[in-house]
Amino acid sequence: MAKRAIYMVSIAGQNISSRIAPMLISLRIVDNEGTHSDTAEIVLDDSNGMIALPRDGDPMIVALGWEGGGLAEVFVGTVDEVRSNGSRGGGRELHISGKGMDTKGKCKEGQQMHADNATVGDVLNKAGKKAGISVQVDPSFASVKREWWGLNDESFIHFGERTARELGGVFKVQGNKAILAKKGGGSVSGAAMSVTVGSWGLNLISWDIMPFTGRPRHKSVRARYYDKKEAKWKETEAQVQDQGAQSVLLDRYSRADEGEAKGSADNGARESEKEKGGGSASIDGSASARAGGTFILVGTRAGVDGAYRIETVTHNYTRSGWTTDLSLKQPQGG
């Protein structure tokens, strides 16, 4: 007997799953690893034009699962957009879209702020407080200190993303919380991210994988900075975990000090490791698949099977079932 996919949708604190069941056409959830906000879209058959419209900014939660196995949240955010479409002969549809962050909130408002001799944890929390966002910083970044931090009409979102690029991390806002995590380093709490397996003949639907590609690969990344004490330019270098690469990638911008240069070089090294291969895979619906987690491909062929980092997760639920599409990067050992 085939498994039956189940779902739960909550808007403004009310579970509306049973009410929308006769009208539900599809659910689509996209979970991104940093930078881009998570998104959700509910498509409903609005033939009679009688569905009550949610309000923008209403809290929105979506959970997916399989009958007998329970539900797991795959989206937490707010209603961002409602769209109606149709035609004279084609009926009507209502699209309810949500984002992981409140796009009307103060997190996109420019700030004038600076901090001297402060850690990244201190300055992000200071900027986050003005934006109404609490911040959790990876322990490996929390104590990074610089002589000066500044926001010159820069939003909290932009500042967080810029800081992540400079340190080799990923920055993400979900609801009223933000995280700065180490790129490819697991969750911000230090706990290991989930592992999802796609196995040929079991839950693997399709795959399209490049186990390696040459152009983005480098053996190391070098960044230049100015040493004020010695009054001269210096360089720092980060090694890339890639035995086949031979060239050195030079950071195109000069950095203010050694700490900033080291962060930029580390970020470049992690990007090079991430881009050395990848592809996509589609599996039977799995709520365990999370952006930033690990996907293990099994049973396709030697040289392709192995572990990959998940960059984006897309859940697609319709009346015919539930599938999960994965965008993959960074082939790993094995």
Image: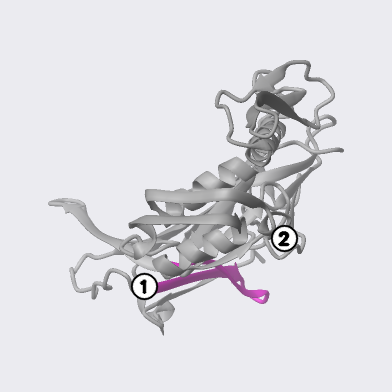
Q: Which mark is residue 139?
A: 2
Q: Which mark is residue 22?
A: 1
x%, y% of residue 127?
46, 62
Dot 1 or dot 2, earlier in sequence: 1
Q: Which mark is residue 242?
A: none
x%, y% of residue 305?
80, 37
Taking 49 as reference, is 169 above or below it? above
Q: Give the mark toward the camera: 1 or 2.
A: 2
Question: For numbered disc 2, what is the local secondary structure?
Answer: helix
Residue 62 sits inside the magenta stretch: yes
Residue 237 sits inside the magenta stretch: no
In this picture the colour scheme is one colour
Q: Amino acid at mark 2?
A: Pro
In the picture, which quadrant includes the C terminus? top right
In the picture, which quadrant includes the N terminus? bottom right
Q: Nearer the viewer, residue 174 or 204?
A: 174
